[in-house]
């Protein structure tokens, strides 16, 4: 291996216990995070095989995936059989001495929101969870990836996992972001240009001036969508902005340990001479807010555009997929995106439910009202985010505008037999997936940033947020 390494290669080397056959490595796993949707079966499997966690203090659990965000904090849920999942998860985490952020815990929230918020996810750490969007915390400089339940059971029992090191990719963004263009727009534009296999199993590092300018929450939004890009994970190496963001987190190192951690984290930046297996670029100087027209994150275009003709879409989009997407979304080529009426506006999920997301949306909604026919919902990503937003008066802005103000959880990011917007409705959403049926039976989902969702709620149709941001 070259002496000049990427950030991910340095973290990998730090956690290498032993090289194995077939170019696979045995890695130390610093953190395992579990949730109530897959956690009960995972921990039950451990119990049935008479095994115990290797290091319970390195494992955390939260209730987020199937909890009902519209009611008071209780084990009741609209998810069919969900109460049994929740009760079983509580039982197993207690049995194994795993710290659980229960619904009555002020630290409860979506796993990928609270892990950085609490300082559980840290730069240079290895961090896994049975959830594909674990890559979110790569925005802090962690090496984080989603795993299956079997791998999760192994990680809990041994604090190790076996992998062949993925290839290294760097995506360089150039230029400067215009007003109204966010990390979500960067991610959608990237996927639209290079497709859902653009990352192709690589560890993707995001670089360039626009990335350095993003706040930490924005970097996590970008890394969140790495799995939609096809990457094994995404990462933004930690910098001074990262250190400042982590300084007051409850579980961040303290005192001399903090000073030592900073020195180590600084050493993890990619070397200037590092070799990349793949390098991609995206110019941002003329990028505008993005919105999806179809049923894949790669079906994204600028807000001022029209639903594209087949001849205008990327060669990565096949004829059959294009026609199927338009049929499902009930759209026609040539329609202006800003002429498409919506029924629902949703702000939430592990992609865009942090305090900066809520502040951004509230900046557009303040003193305004959503269209009377629009169902508008905002779900903070954690109870801490909810409290912070309420302390800043953001909840009042949302409620006066006509949004429902919820408690934290994954909520309507996905439909699993629980709460639904209603069959066949059209929603604009800050979530990460717009697949057929993702948010409900025949629900038509347009992905966008919190700014765009807020503007669209006001107009009752997909709307450009930029006129609302003019001074």
Image (spheres, helix red, strand yellow):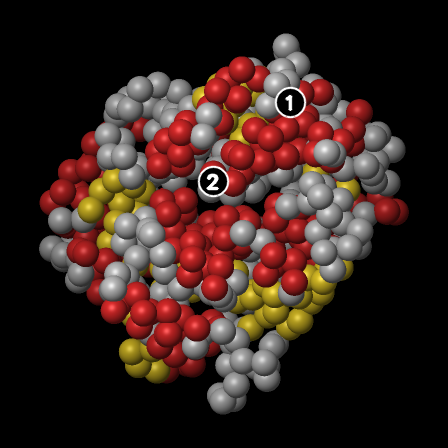
Q: Splitting the image into 4 quarters, where does residue 323 fall?
A: top right
Counting residues from the start of the chain, the first of labels 2 and 1 encountered is: 2
Label 1 sits on a secondary structure element that is helix
Res. 113 visible in picture: yes
Neighbor class of circle 1 (other Cα within 10 Å; few <14, some 14-19, many 20+) is many
Residue 14 picture quarter: bottom left
Please name whichever residue, 260 or 461, is drawn nearer the observer in this view of the structure. 260
Image coords of residue 445 (percent x, y): 63, 31
Residue 221 point in image, percent of width and height: 54, 48
Q: Tell me which residue sits at (42%, 24%) in the image.
A: 406
- The answer to whether 197 appears left or right of 93 in the picture is right
* Outermost residue toward the front in this view: 471
Label at residue 171:
none
- Tell me, yes or no, if residue 425 can be seen here: no
User: Is 7 displayed left or right of 190 in the figure?
Assistant: left
Q: Nearer the viewer, residue 228 or 109?
A: 109
All told, the count of numbered labels is 2
Q: Secondary structure at mark 2?
A: loop
Give the residue pinned by disc 1.
Answer: 457
Residue 235 at what x, y percent from top left? 51, 62
Alpha-carbon span between mark 2 and mark 1: 19 Å
x then y, percent, for residue 301: 76, 43
Q: Residue at x 57, y 17 (%)?
A: 401
Q: Which residue is mark 2?
A: 354
Could you tell me which residue is drawn at 64 percent across and 22 percent down? 457
Residue at the location (30% across, 37% down)?
108
């Amino acid at each position: 291996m070259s002496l000049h390494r990427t950030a991910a290669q340095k973290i990998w080397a730090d956690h290498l216990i032993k090289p194995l056959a077939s170019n696979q490595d045995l890695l130390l796993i610093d953190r395992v995070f579990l949730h109530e949707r897959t956690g009960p079966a995972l921990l039950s499997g451990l119990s049935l095989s008479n095994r115990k966690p290797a290091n319970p203090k390195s494992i955390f659990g939260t209730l987020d995936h199937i909890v009902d965000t519209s009611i008071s904090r209780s084990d009741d849920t609209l998810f069919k059989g969900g109460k049994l999942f929740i009760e079983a998860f509580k039982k197993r985490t207690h049995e194994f001495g795993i710290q659980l952020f229960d619904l009555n815990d002020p630290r409860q929230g979506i796993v990928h929101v609270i892990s950085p918020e609490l300082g559980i996810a840290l730069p240079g750490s290895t961090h896994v969870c049975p959830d594909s969007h674990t890559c979110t915390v790569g925005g802090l400089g962690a090496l984080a990836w989603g795993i299956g339940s079997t791998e999760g059971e192994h990680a809990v029992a041994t604090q190790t996992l076996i992998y062949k090191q993925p290839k290294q990719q760097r995506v360089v963004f150039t230029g400067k972001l215009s007003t109204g263009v966010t990390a979500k727009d960067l991610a959608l534009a990237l996927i639209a240009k290079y497709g859902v296999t653009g990352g192709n199993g690589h560890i993707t590092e995001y670089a360039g001036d626009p990335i350095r300018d993003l706040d930490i929450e924005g970097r996590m939004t970008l890394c969140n969508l790495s799995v939609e890009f096809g990457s094994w994970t995404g990462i933004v190496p930690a910098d001074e902005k990262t250190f400042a963001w982590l300084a007051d987190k409850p579980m961040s190192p303290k005192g001399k340990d903090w000073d030592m951690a900073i020195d180590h984290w600084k050493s993890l930046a990619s070397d200037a001479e590092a070799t990349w297996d793949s390098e991609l670029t995206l110019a941002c100087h003329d990028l505008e807010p993005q919105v999806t027209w179809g049923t894949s994150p790669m079906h994204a275009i600028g807000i001022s555009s029209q639903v594209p003709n087949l001849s205008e879409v990327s060669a990565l989009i096949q004829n059959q997929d294009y026609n199927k997407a338009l049929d499902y979304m009930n759209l026609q080529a040539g329609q202006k995106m800003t002429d498409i009426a919506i029924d629902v506006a949703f702000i939430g999920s592990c992609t865009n439910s942090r305090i900066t997301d809520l502040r951004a949306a509230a900046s557009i909604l303040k003193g305004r009202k959503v269209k009377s026919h629009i169902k508008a919902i905002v779900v903070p990503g954690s109870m801490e985010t909810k409290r912070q937003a309420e302390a800043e008066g953001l909840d009042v802005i949302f409620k006066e505008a006509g949004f429902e103000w919820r408690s934290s959880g994954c909520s309507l990011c996905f439909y699993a037999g629980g709460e639904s917007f209603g069959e066949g409705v059209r929603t604009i959403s800050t979530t990460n997936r717009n697949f057929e049926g993702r948010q409900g039976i025949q629900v038509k989902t347009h992905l966008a940033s919190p700014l765009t969702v807020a503007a669209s709620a006001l107009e009752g149709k997909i709307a450009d947020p930029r006129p609302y941001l003019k001074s």
